[in-house]
Amino acid sequence: MEKYAASCGLYCGACSSMLTNERHNGAPDASHFVCEYAESPCAGCGDDCRAGCEFIVCCHGRGIDNCAFCPDFPCTMITNFSREEWIHHRDVLDNLSRIKEVGLVAWLEEQRRQWSCPGCGKRTHWYQNRCHSCGAEWSGRYDTAESNTQ
């Protein structure tokens, strides 16, 4: 489950690119997922990303796995990332503070619950407001009108 914890504080378990990748690879908990827009599959922050992600490079250079445990948190790099156009990036500073407070395992469980359908419990993505599995609808997540993703 730690594959869903990005070094920058994003919860990859609610990423449509991750869900697309897992559906294509036959993951049972992603089999229900239907992407409403063109999405490039992503396998998460693994070995393929180590050279290209500024957060992974920085964390590994400091001997840590996550920005939450950096003595310079919050730095300019993560603060700027939290201000980018993607609405879900706004959560990274709070996410990293929460990881530091409760630990990675507890944070991952909180995120799993937060990003599951309130009707059937299936995984959902950041900008989803209707379950592809049971049809349940919800609000209160990200305003999709502010997003470029739907």
Image: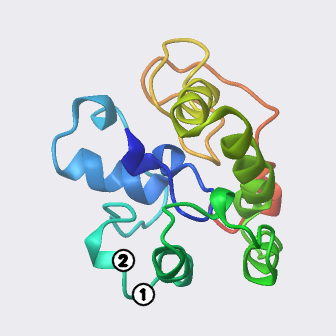
Please state which amino acid type lies under the numbered disc 2: Cys
Labelled disc at residue 49: 2
* Category of crowding for the residue at label 1, using alpha-carbon neighbours closer than 10 angstroms: few (below 14), some (14–19), many (at least 20): few
Image quadrant where residue 86 sits? bottom right
Q: Residue furthest left?
A: 26
Seen at 47% across and 44% down, the residue is 13
Q: Is residue 119 left or right of residue 100?
A: left
Residue 111 placement, left or right of 144: left
Q: Is residue 125 in view from this perspective?
A: yes
Q: Which mark is residue 88?
A: none
Residue 118 figure quarter: top right
The amino acid type, in three-letter code, at marker 1 is Gly
| Alpha carbon separation for disc pair 1 and 2 | 5 Å
Residue 100 horizontal/vertical position (percent): 70, 45
Q: Residues within 10 Å of mark 2 (few under 14, many from 20)?
A: some
Q: How many marks?
A: 2
Work out whether residue 82 or residue 60 is closer to the camera in this orientation and state it: 60
Q: Secondary structure at mark 1?
A: loop
Q: On the picture, is 8 further left or further right than 51?
A: right
* Residue that carries the numbered disc 1 in the rendered image: 52
Q: Position of residue 122 (x, y in %)?
A: 44, 23
- In what quadrant of the picture does the N terminus appear? top left
> Do tag 1 and tag 2 residues touch (Cβ < 8 Å)?
yes
Q: Residue at x 82, y 61 (%)?
A: 146
Query: Which element type, helix, strand or loop, lies under badge 2?
Result: helix
Task: Identify the residue shown where x is 66% and y is 36%.
Answer: 129
